[in-house]
């Protein structure tokens, strides 16, 4: 089926969280954040991650990582 992409994320959620905490570059941090959202099933697709990322939200941080609650 066209438009379907399979993504295998080999890092664990803990590894992704650690990488996000250490990352200083904003663009790389955002890429790691999207991988984390996909891994934890906070979003169900890259497109919904892009929409969530550009949405009008007030950022909240926990342990140096941006926190997005499911269902927002």
Image: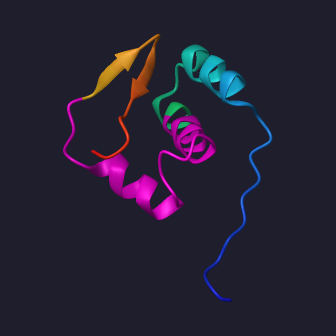
The answer to whether 69 is drawn above or below residue 18 in the figure is below
Magenta highlight range: 30-58
Task: Give residue 14's quadrant in the image.
Answer: top right
Residue 15 coordinates in the image, percent (x, y): 71, 23
Question: Which colour scheme appears in the figure?
Answer: rainbow
Q: Nearer the viewer, residue 5 or 31?
A: 5
Magenta portion: prevailing SS class? helix
Give x and y (percent) for residue 48: 42, 59
The answer to which of 72 and 53 lies nearer the viewer is 72
State left or right for residue 60 relative to residue 9.
left
Q: In the image, what residue occupies the spot 52% across and 36% down?
A: 33
Q: Is residue 64 left or right of residue 3?
A: left
Q: Residue furthest bottom?
A: 1
Number of on-image labels: 0
31 within the magenta span: yes
Q: Give above or below for 47 relative to 65.
A: below
Residue 16 screen position, x and y as percent = 65, 28
Write the residue at 21% across / 38% down: 57
Figure quadrant of the C terminus: top left
Taking the spot 47% from the left edge, 10% from the top edge, the residue there is 63
Which residue is the extreme one toward the front?
71
Tell me if residue 33 is in the magenta stretch.
yes
């Amino acid at each position: 089926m066209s438009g379907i992409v399979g993504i295998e994320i080999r890092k664990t959620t803990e590894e992704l969280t650690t990488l996000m905490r250490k990352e200083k570059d904003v663009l790389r941090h955002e890429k790691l954040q999207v991988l984390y959202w996909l891994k934890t099933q906070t979003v169900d697709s890259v497109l919904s991650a892009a929409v969530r990322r550009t949405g009008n939200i007030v950022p909240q941080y926990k342990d140096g990582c941006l926190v997005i609650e499911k269902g927002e």
